[in-house]
Image: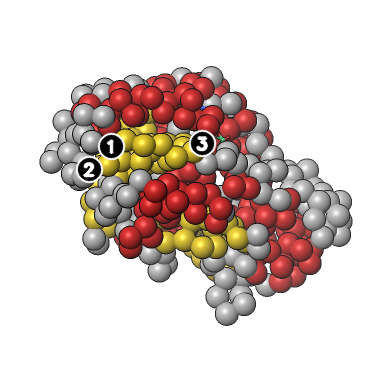
Amino acid sequence: MPITAPPAWRQLAVTTPGHRYEVLIGAGLLQDARAWAGLPHGRSAVIVSNPQVHALYGNTVAAALAPLRDQVSHVLLPDGEQHKNWDSLNHIFDHLLAHTCDRQTLLVALGGGVVGDITGFAAATYQRGVPFVQVPTTLLAQVDSSVGGKTAINHPRGKNMIGAFHQPERVLCDLQTLATLPLRELRAGLAEVIKYGPIADVALLDWLEATLPALLQGDTTALAHAVHRACQIKADVVGQDEREIGLRAILNFGHTFGHAIEAGMGYGHWLHGEAVACGMVLAADLSAELGLIDAAFTQRLARLIAAAGLPVHAPAMPLARWFELMQLDKKAAAGDIRFVVIGPPGQAALRSAPRDVVERVIRRHSPKAGQEPAAA
Ligand code: NAD
Ligand code: GLY
């Protein structure tokens, strides 16, 4: 059934070979029946969240679902990246089985990327697949993780190592939910917005440089544009390469270094967006070392990242540990670590790099890797 979104909302479609769904972006859409209309029919819905987010928005979502389902129940997971694991996943399965949930049960992921990724994975695997809706409540989840159908949990040895591709039925980005987001989390989300500039849209970088103060103050008009443009770019990439055979890897700009930081520091210490922000500085520097961009572009990117209040210096970590962790990156092939590099700005590609060049980049940015850090 088509969605009749009011003009104040923005709307875009994600189309993959087996699926098509809408991303709705607007203020206050969670309590609006039009946002929920036309979802697949079923007897029950399960809202998956964490205590923090559920206390804020659980009742609103339950009220929206009540006219659509006979049974609406809630399952709460512990908050935090360190809980993106088997225990949380099993907690969802236990709940679904205890409530005799069937294949038409709708899972609703209410929260940030952690809740979204785990719920998506539960939806991909419970009874071999049930429908789910993403209700992202962090900026990071609205601009990235809720769109595109990547679902996963972490393994102690590596980020997002166990998961599946499973597209949601809809993504509801309510900009009002961002009003309660801690500033540190808002900044972390900006990292994934900034990411789309170097890989796909240099004009977005110009806009971000001009609009950063408004974004950091939570200006809804600015946030609406950021979420919409990010989702447009992501939908375009996912539409061309849902399963990351090639092109989709560009969305991982900064993530090879970033995932190593996240896992190396212990999940939950560096936020995902913070690790990606710093990883982008290293990935841009690597691109410059490979002669693909001017060093001036790395500096420009680092300036924007720093202005967003995000880290540009990598943590202290021995070189061997960096390589051990990067070897586990999902883009690695036959033991060869591969990086998303940019060049020219606005275009990205996946490639390997000589070990000595990568070492040089890490040494420049990570104290204790072997040398003093350079000013970014
Ligand atoms: P998160 O889910 O941990 O949320 C951050 C914090 O904000 C949590 O403490 C949460 O409880 C709190 N929170 C969420 N919404 C809130 C709100 N509206 N008000 C107040 N507090 C709120 O972190 P995240 O940054 O949203 O997501 C990071 C995760 O996303 C990582 O696990 C990462 O791997 C994953 N990710 C996945 C994809 C993908 O394509 N699937 C893409 C990017 C990132
Ligand atoms: N965030 C990377 C991707 O969705 O592919």
Q: At x 49% / y 38%, what residue is drawn?
A: 76
Q: Which mark is residue 354?
A: none
State the image coordinates of residue 119 (x, y, percent, origin top left): 43, 48
**235 left or right of 141 in image:** left
Tag 2, which secondary structure?
loop
Whether 226 is drawn above or below 43: the answer is: above
State the image coordinates of residue 163 (x, y, percent, origin top left): 47, 61
Distance from mark 1 CB to nearest ligand 1 atom below 8 Å: no
Looking at the rendered structure, the number of numbered marks drawn on it comes to 3
Q: CA distance from mark 3 to mark 1?
A: 20 Å
Q: Point out the tag, 2 or 3, that comes first from the N-terminus.
A: 2
Q: Which mark is residue 43?
A: 2
Quadrant including the N terminus: top left
Q: Point out the tag, 1 or 2, that comes first from the N-terminus.
A: 2
Q: At x 49% / y 54%, what residue is drawn?
A: 90
Residue type (three-letter) at the residue carrying disc 2 = Arg
Q: Which mark is residue 50?
A: 3
Comparing labels 2 and 3, the label whose residue is closer to the camera: 2
Whether 76 is drawn above or below 323: the answer is: above
Whether 16 is drawn above or below 328: the answer is: above
Q: Point out the tag, 3 or 1, that comes first from the N-terminus.
A: 3
Residue type (three-letter) at the residue carrying disc 3 = Asn
Q: CA distance from mark 2 to mark 3?
A: 23 Å
Distance from mark 3 CB to nearest ligand 1 atom below 8 Å: yes
Comparing labels 3 and 1, the label whose residue is closer to the camera: 1
Whether 54 is drawn above or below 193: the answer is: above
* Crowdedness near tag 2: few (<14), some (14–19) or many (≥20) residues, C-alpha within 10 Å: some
Residue where numbered disc 1 is placed: 71
**107 left or right of 310 in image:** left
Q: Are marks 1 and 2 in contact (CB under 8 Å)?
A: yes
In this view, the residue in front, 373 or 47, is 47
Tag 1, which secondary structure?
strand
